[in-house]
Image: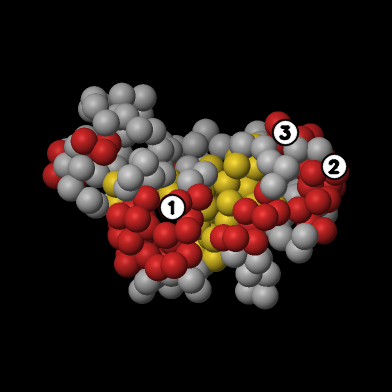
Amino acid sequence: MATNRPLLIPRVIGHRGAAARAPENTLAGFRKAAELGCRWVEFDVRLTADGYPVVFHDDTLERTTDGAGAVAQTALHDLLKLKASGEPIPTLDAALAQLMASGLGGNLEVKAEPGREEALATVIARDIGTATVELLVTSFSMPALAAFARLAPVVLRGILTERLAPDWHADALNIGADAMACDHRYLTRDSVASVRDAGLPLLTYTVNEPARARQLWGWGVSGVITDAPDTILAALPD
């Protein structure tokens, strides 16, 4: 594991910007997160049909935009015509520029369709190469993480998983992980301790209840990802 590299994860990270306070995965959401006091935001990156990285969570457009169809089958030119609750879909370049302007770091989740892991890792590695932004790159896709580790070995990376598998530690060693990120619903005091004992910070998603956030911090979780960062920031212990 790549535990020799410094990784200072904030206690509170805005989910998809500040998803309960502004349109998710938009520049407006990033600005709102910064306004609410976040130091980091979590956001998702996937490929368009013509190979451009855009900030978008779902496979398809219907839930959050006025468009329809799969993101992977839509060209960038057509995506940029759409609105997400009145906001445009950002390119990765635009998102990085907003993070820099707002003084934010980020947890960039790689959303790669099977067979496109290398292509997405390549364009992300290219675009973040000149960005002066503190980033942790995570993914559920081990092939995407493996490609990214090869293409951008100095960039911090972490394994994103719903729950810790029995062989999670071997996976972390194989990928040179700097962190783990898990669904809070499946964490226990012992599972958190197992990650911390391995020398890795642990992020958890999506925590919107202050009491649960306080419990997770008490167990040793490094950072909670939340839709409502103002609510969770107010729960931080003095």
Q: How many neighbours does mark 3 have within 10 angstroms: few (below 14), some (14-19), or many (20 or more)?
A: few
Amino acid at dot 1: Ala
Question: What is the distance, in whole Å, between disc 3 and disc 2 at their CAs?
Answer: 10 Å
Name the front one of labels 3 and 1. Answer: 1
Q: Quadrant of the N terminus?
A: bottom right
Q: How many neighbours does mark 1 have within 10 angstroms: few (below 14), some (14-19), or many (20 or more)?
A: many
Nearest to N terminus: mark 1 or mark 2? 1
Residues under numbered marks 3 and 2 in contact, where contact means CB atoms less than 8 Å apart = no
Question: What is the distance, in whole Å, between disc 1 and disc 2 at their CAs?
Answer: 30 Å
Q: What is the x, y in percent for residue 93? A: 30, 60
Question: What is the distance, in whole Å, between disc 3 and disc 1 at their CAs?
Answer: 24 Å
On screen, residue 224 versus residue 58, left or right, reads: right
Dividing the picture into quadrants, the one containing residue 197 is bottom right
Residue beneath the point at 36% across and 24% down: 63
Amino acid at dot 3: Tyr
Residue beneath the point at 68% across and 69% down: 3
Q: Secondary structure at mark 3?
A: helix
Coloration of the structure image: secondary structure
Dividing the picture into quadrants, the one containing residue 62 is top left
Q: Is residue 116 above or below residue 81?
A: below
Q: Secondary structure at mark 1?
A: helix
- Residue named by callout 1: 144
The mark found on residue 189 in the picture is 2
- Residue named by callout 3: 186
Q: Quadrant of the C terminus?
A: bottom right
